[in-house]
Image: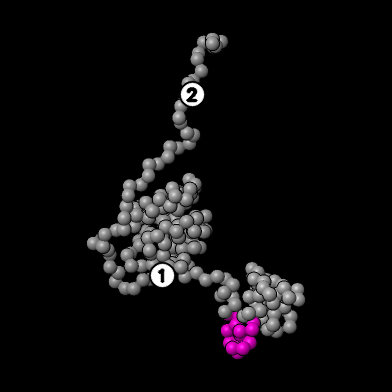
Amino acid sequence: MHHRNGSAPAPRRRGGRRGAPRKPPPAPAWRPNADWRQLPLFGQVPRDYGRLDPSGVDLTSPWLTWAKYLAHRFAEARGWGRNIRFGVNRGLALVLTGYVEGDAIRHSEIFTPLRSRDLPVGHVVTVLEEMGIFEDDSEPSFEGWLAERLQGLAPGIRSEAERWTRVLRDGGPAASRDGKARSGSTSTVSGRPCWNGRTAMTTCGK
């Protein structure tokens, strides 16, 4: 076939993929040797991960090397996408900077900093759990709300109020028997806020 301008079309690339080439998988890594351990002078001090500067993370940490290898294995096994992989590695670099063996990385300390940076908290936690250095100190919001509202009540009233509050939220035989007990309806404890399925309602009837 002849072309009017006298030039042949550029040949198509074969077997190529658009975008940046995929990085090679990380080399196998294991838990850092105990000889590397840095003994703390005092007990574990709560850390403010929100003050960490992403540009100042320690990319040479053997804990991060191990974590990135585990993250790669999870990604391959569970089909994590490219953005998830990138976010997980960023999150691990943040929370493992300055990590000392024997410390626990707590959910309450890392959840907000990671979420504020739009990093996949659950995926990061999966890797930390596999490493055995994660402590889940979170508490379901409903359970905390209920414990606070029931505090100080007499045992008999407390038991009945807790039972009905759970029925109002979760449903059950008692709620469906007369059709009156529904999420966000009145409480058996006069003057107490009611749970509407997400948050406590500010007013409640008798």
Q: Is residue 139 left or right of residue 153?
A: left
Q: Residue at x 47, y 56 (%)?
A: 123
The correct choice, above or below, for 46 with respect to 7 in the image is below
What secondary structure is found at the residue carrying circle 2? loop
Pick whichever, 17 or 162, lies toward us. 162
Three-letter code for the amino acid on which mark 1 is drawn: Pro
77 in the magenta segment:
no
Which residue is the site of mark 1? 46
Judge whether 144 appears above or below 33 on screen.
below
Place of residue 175 in the rendered image (x, y in percent of width and height, measured from the top left): 70, 75
Marks 2 and 1, Cα distance to the nearest angstrom? Answer: 57 Å
Image position, residue 60 (x, y; %): 32, 53
Q: Is residue 89 visible?
A: no
Tell whether 24 sits left or right of 9: left
Whether residue 160 is visible to the viewer of this picture, yes or no, is yes
Q: Which residues are magenta?
A: 148-161
Instruction: Tell me if 142 is positioned left or right of 75 in this view.
Output: right
* Image vertical order of residue 70 relative to residue 14, above or below: below
Residue at screen point 48% across, 61% down: 113
**Residue 25, quarter of picture:** top left
Question: Compared to 66, does 152 lie above or below?
Answer: below
Kindly identify which numbered label has been placed on residue 12: 2
